[in-house]
Image (cartoon, rainbow, N blue to C red):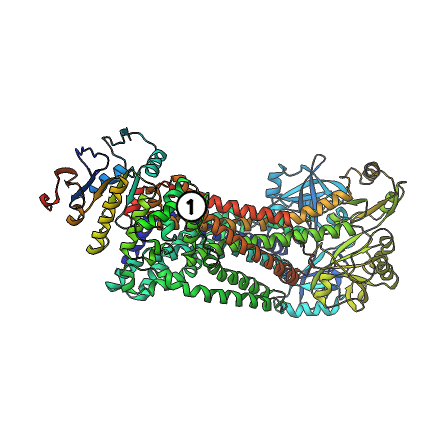
């Protein structure tokens, strides 16, 4: 068995924007997956909103993700068959919210990510940057208190990457969301309030300002 | 082993290891298809082989046989036969059936052969355990002496000098076991299950004094057999047939040809559906390994070798499916042999059930080889398309992210046009008549219909989705789940089209056959209701069992007419005689009865005119009524004449009417009893239809008949006295038994189609692991993922069922109007059995959802993180 994370202990306060950097395989994404309940720790404990997640059932984790967590992926992971608007509305639909509420929230998010003009387009008809904007809107549409972003700029060019990070930062601040960002990009990490550097499954150092960060 | 083969095997085994579940599903599908085909073929061969073996065993050294009608030959004919040039020996034979009695219960029918034992002691392939001393030789020819086959003696627990009770016709005969028949060789022989009597004893026992059933001739070796046969034909009366023993097997084969052919074709449906399954599996394998194919091509594998790689993989599935399917098929055949021989005996001619693996015990390896060959060929044919597709992979595109399905979209329209064209072709193919009695164009039309609908399946997958706006609707989660499912399904028209086609073929065959069988049953019910009007039928105890050879066991004494007529509640009694004769080389039933009486009390469903009028006219002008099947086969109609070779010489009869008849597809002739007796000199009766006075109690009359006739049978088993209701029920039971096998074969095809759905959905789940993981990550529950897969199954199911209904409807028309009409000649009134159709559709729907349930459950359990990582 591979030990992905070891002796990782940290506390992130509400509203903080925290980035994790480190080489491939150092455990950044695993940490994010554990926080999202997509993977389960073999030992240790994750406390969300003061509540232990130890022994939560699969459905309880689903409910936490529906209510509390939004996730942005490197590969966007939009549903191919749905339009941009439908992709954004999907988390609300999965929660079984009423139609009018869903339409309003989707409309609002399309506006906020600047994609209203592309609402009827399918993912295949959008650029990488546009797809990631839709993915961000989808992650935030249900008003989660925690936003997890796993390499959100990994599949787009640096120009669009900067815009995406700015968008995440702006939306997170306005929504008072806590953000956990995993990235390889120093530029992306600069958006965070502070940065944890990881190596071989451990948290190595915390840097408050990007200027102090030593690229691993 | 050549390096190339080693490399191919290496790749093959790695793929099998990678997808064990799909491999298993595919092999099971092929195995089921092969098993149905092997079982039907093996059972078909076995039934006829056991008949052939019985014929050839009894024939011994006989090179020619002389026979007349079922009523037998005058034994004086033998004297004339012996004088004919080229005849070395001629011996009389009686071939009848008796029933072994255990106490007062009828046990088992046994074939009794009457031979001139003194002359033929060691010529027929059996030995007698009893040493042939002079006194014992005398004992052999005593009237009650019977020799039993070794197996019969063991089963009945009898040995030499024991007594055995046999029922012959209606009489009970107590015989003495004069000896046990042993085989002359070590091989199993039909003698083991027969009884032998001396010819004189048999004549007495079967009340055939002065008559024999057959004369067996050994021809002079120096003369050509056909020349001797010709000499005999010139001397003997024309109604007598002179033929080689093997011809009887051929005759039976000819009679059951259409029945066997239809059964065989139906057994191929499983293979056809299995072919779709293989196509599906291989298409998935190609899509899944597109990048891998690109790598092979990049490192030097030629196009043809890529194709060979995939064909080999399909061949491997075929090989394993063939082995498993053959083993299952041989096991299934053991059950089918009994069912099949019963059906053939019911409908055509008495054939014994296969004697414990006559065919397959000796030929197991050749059957296995055949099964493997079928499995491999079917699998490789199914894999041709995907293999060619794999070989044409463009290396650059395969190595870069790309969607091959997109390029196939263009073909969907083309396929649809092809599908519609094939449906038009189906219409044209249904017009021509049969070729040598085989509805070749009807079968081709069926294939064309199924292929046409299969070609329409992809456009149904892509064409049906209607974009709906989900945002803003209440309760949109179901709608969006449905939408995602439909959209995803429509993205793979090729693969899903094949799955739908498999379901469509299974369902179309099921519905087509169901409508045909129900329509046929309805027609038979109408026919029975309209024509079987006697209140009671007095019949021999083994009547309707259809397993007897010879007419004596199926006959009643004519004097019973007086006994029955004397019962006060009886208004009228008819004497019905049914014997088989040959007309223009075809075995035909000749039915004789009192036509005037029948006109007054009952009727036939005549094609033109009114029944009683036609019956009276036939009686008056010594004419015939001919069944529809025979009229079509002989090319005669109302008003024409037909020449028949009767024991009194060739006679030309006017055909008064043609009537619908569903009792045999061999054809039937109906004439007045007086006319029959004058020509055939046969006064026996097969059954007595009895009509009662109004208000008479059927049960009371039945009791009285049984009581009065029990005295007449002298301790034998009383005849059957069957009420009208029981007779109708019995006829319909025979009908249902005939089609039992059909349902088994259909079920196999449907199960294979279901495996196709499981296969497709497993593929779909594998392809969509990332999508499912995403949905789980953004708040979708495991239950919602399960629903998503079930929606997809439902979508495929709905299209498959819709096409299956269309296909089934058209197929039922083809079966009723073309294939059945051309194979058997029956006119069937088509009905639409709504209830049964709803059941079939519901069954297919439920089966689809059940097939979808397991992949759905599996999808819901997939680990989310791995799914998100999956590229």
Residue at the spot of label 1: B788
Q: Position of residue B690 (x, y in %)?
A: 83, 46
Q: Chain of mark 1?
A: B
Q: Position of residue B52 (x, y in %)?
A: 60, 55
Quadrant of the snapshot with the N terminus of chain B: bottom left
In terms of image quadrants, where is residue B88?
bottom right
Q: Nearer the viewer, residue B11 or B503?
A: B503
Q: Is residue B771 left or right of residue B557?
A: left
Mark 1 closeness class: few <14, some 14–19, many ≥20 residues within 10 Å: many
In terms of image quadrants, where is residue B654?
bottom right
Q: Position of residue B220 (x, y in %)?
A: 64, 66
Q: Nearer the viewer, residue B225 or B171?
A: B171
Vertical arrangement, residue B16 with respect to residue B227, above or below: above
Q: Secondary structure at mark 1?
A: helix
In terms of image quadrants, where is residue B85?
bottom right
Q: Is residue B422 left or right of residue B104?
A: left
Residue B418 in sight in this render: yes
Residue B353 in sight in this render: no
Residue at position x 23%, y 37% in the image = A15
Vertical arrangement, residue B703 with respect to residue B438, above or below: above
Q: Position of residue B695 (x, y in %)?
A: 87, 40
Q: Nearer the viewer, residue B638 or B203?
A: B638
């Amino acid at each position: 068995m591979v030990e992905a994370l070891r002796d990782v202990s940290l506390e992130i306060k509400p509203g903080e924007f925290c980035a994790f950097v480190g080489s491939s395989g150092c455990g950044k994404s695993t940490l994010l997956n554990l926080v999202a309940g997509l993977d389960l720790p073999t030992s240790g404990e994750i406390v969300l909103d003061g509540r232990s997640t130890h022994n939560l059932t699969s459905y309880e984790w689903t409910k936490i993700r529906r209510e509390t967590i939004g996730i942005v992926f490197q590969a966007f992971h939009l549903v191919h068959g749905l339009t941009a608007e439908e992709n954004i509305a999907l988390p609300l639909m999965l929660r079984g919210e009423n139609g009018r509420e869903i339409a309003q929230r989707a409309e609002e998010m399309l506006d906020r990510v600047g994609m209203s003009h592309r609402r009827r387009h399918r993912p295949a008809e959008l650029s990488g940057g546009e797809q990631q904007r839709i993915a961000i809107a989808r992650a935030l549409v249900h008003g989660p208190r925690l936003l997890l972003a796993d390499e959100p700029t990994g599949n787009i060019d640096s120009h669009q990457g900067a815009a995406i990070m700015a968008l995440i930062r702006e939306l997170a601040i306005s929504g008072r969301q806590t953000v956990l960002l995993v990235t390889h990009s120093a530029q992306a990490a600069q958006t965070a309030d502070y940065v944890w550097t990881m190596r071989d499954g451990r948290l190595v150092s915390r840097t408050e300002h990007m200027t102090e960060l030593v690229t691993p | 082993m050549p390096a190339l083969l080693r490399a191919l095997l290496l790749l093959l085994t790695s793929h099998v290891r990678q997808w064990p579940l799909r491999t298993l599903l595919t092999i099971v599908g092929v195995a089921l298809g092969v098993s149905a085909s092997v079982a039907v073929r093996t059972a078909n061969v076995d039934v006829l082989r056991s008949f052939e073996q019985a014929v050839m065993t009894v024939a011994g050294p006989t090179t020619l046989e002389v026979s007349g009608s079922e009523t037998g030959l005058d034994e004086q004919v033998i004297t004339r036969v012996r004088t004919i040039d080229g005849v070395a020996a001629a011996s009389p034979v009686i071939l009848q059936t008796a029933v072994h009695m255990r106490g007062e219960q009828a046990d088992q029918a046994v074939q009794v052969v009457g031979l001139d034992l003194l002359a033929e002691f060691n010529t027929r392939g059996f030995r007698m355990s009893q040493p042939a001393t002079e006194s014992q030789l005398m004992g052999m020819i005593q009237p009650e002496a019977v020799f039993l086959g070794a197996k019969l003696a063991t089963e009945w627990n009898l040995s030499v000098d024991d007594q055995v009770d046999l029922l012959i016709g209606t009489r009970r005969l107590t015989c003495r076991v004069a000896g046990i028949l042993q085989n002359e060789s070590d091989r199993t022989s039909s003698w083991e299950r027969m009884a032998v009597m001396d010819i004189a004893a048999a004549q007495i026992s079967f009340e055939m004094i002065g008559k024999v059933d057959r004369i067996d001739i050994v021809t002079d070796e120096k003369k050509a057999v056909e020349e001797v046969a010709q000499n005999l034909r010139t001397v003997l009366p024309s109604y007598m047939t002179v033929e080689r023993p093997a011809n009887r097997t051929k005759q039976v084969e000819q009679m059951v040809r259409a029945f066997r052919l239809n059964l065989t074709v139906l057994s191929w449906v499983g293979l056809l559906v299995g072919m779709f399954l293989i196509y599906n599996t291989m298409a998935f394998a190609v899509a899944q390994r597109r990048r891998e194919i690109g790598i092979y091509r990049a490192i030097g594998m030629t196009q043809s070798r890529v194709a060979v790689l995939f064909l080999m993989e399909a061949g491997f599935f075929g090989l394993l499916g063939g082995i498993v399917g053959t083993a299952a098929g041989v096991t299934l055949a053991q059950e089918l042999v009994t069912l099949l021989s019963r059906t053939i005996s019911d409908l055509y001619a008495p054939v014994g059930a296969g004697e414990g693996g006559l065919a397959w015990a000796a030929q197991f390896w050749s059957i296995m080889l055949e099964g493997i060959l079928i499995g491999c060929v079917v699998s490789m044919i199914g894999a041709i398309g995907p293999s060619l597709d794999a070989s044409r992979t463009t290396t650059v595109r395969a190595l870069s992210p790309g969607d091959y399905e997109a390029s196939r979209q263009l073909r969907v329209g083309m396929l649809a046009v092809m599908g519609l064209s094939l449906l038009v072709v189906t219409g044209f193919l249904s017009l021509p008549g049969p070729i040598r009695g085989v509805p070749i164009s009807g079968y081709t039309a069926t294939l064309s219909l199924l292929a046409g609908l299969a070609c329409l399946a992809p456009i149904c997958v892509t064409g049906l989705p209607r974009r709906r706006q989900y945002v803003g609707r209440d309760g949109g989660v179901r709608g969006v789940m449905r939408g995602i499912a439909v959209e995803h399904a429509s993205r793979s028209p090729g693969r899903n089209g094949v799955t739908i086609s498999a379901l469509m073929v299974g369902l179309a065959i099921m519905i087509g056959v169901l409508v045909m069988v129900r329509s046929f049953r309805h027609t038979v019910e109408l026919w029975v209701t309209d024509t079987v009007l006697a209140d009671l039928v007095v019949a021999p105890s083994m009547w309707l069992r259809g397993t007897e050879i010879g007419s004596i066991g199926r006959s009643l004494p004519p004097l019973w007419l007086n006994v029955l007529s004397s019962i006060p509640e009886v208004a009228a009694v008819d004497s019905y005689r049914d014997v088989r004769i040959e007309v223009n080389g075809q075995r035909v039933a000749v039915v004789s009865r009192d036509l005037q009486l029948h006109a007054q009390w009952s009727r036939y469903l005549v094609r033109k005119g009114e029944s009683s009028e036609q019956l009276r006219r036939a009686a008056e002008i010594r004419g015939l009524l001919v069944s529809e099947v025979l009229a079509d086969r002989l090319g005669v109609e109302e008003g024409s004449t037909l020449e028949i070779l009767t024991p009194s010489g060739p006679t030309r009869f006017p055909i008064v009417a043609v009537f619908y008849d569903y009792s045999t597809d061999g054809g039937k002739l109906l004439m007045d009893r007086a006319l029959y007796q004058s020509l055939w000199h046969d006064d026996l009766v097969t059954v007595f239809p009895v009509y009662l006075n109004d208000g008479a109690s059927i049960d009371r009359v039945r009791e009285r008949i049984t009581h009065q006739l029990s005295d007449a049978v002298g301790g034998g088993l009383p005849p059957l006295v069957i009420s009208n209701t029981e007779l109708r029920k019995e006829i319909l039971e025979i009908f249902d038994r005939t089609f039992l096998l059909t349902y088994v074969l259909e079920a196999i095809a449907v199960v294979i189609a279901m495996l196709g759905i499981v296969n497709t959905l497993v593929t779909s789940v594998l392809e969509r692991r990332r999508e499912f993981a995403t949905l789980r990550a953004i708040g979708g529950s495991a239950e919602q993922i399960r629903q998503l897969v079930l929606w997809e199954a439902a979508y495929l199911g709905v299209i498959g069922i819709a096409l299956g209904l269309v296909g089934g409807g058209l197929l039922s028309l083809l079966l009723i109007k073309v294939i059945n009409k051309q194979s058997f000649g029956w006119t069937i009134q088509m009905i639409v059995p709504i209830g049964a159709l709803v059941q079939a559709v519901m069954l297919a729907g439920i089966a689809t959802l059940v097939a979808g349930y397991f992949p759905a459950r599996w999808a819901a359990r997939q680990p989310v993180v791995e799914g998100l990582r999956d590229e």
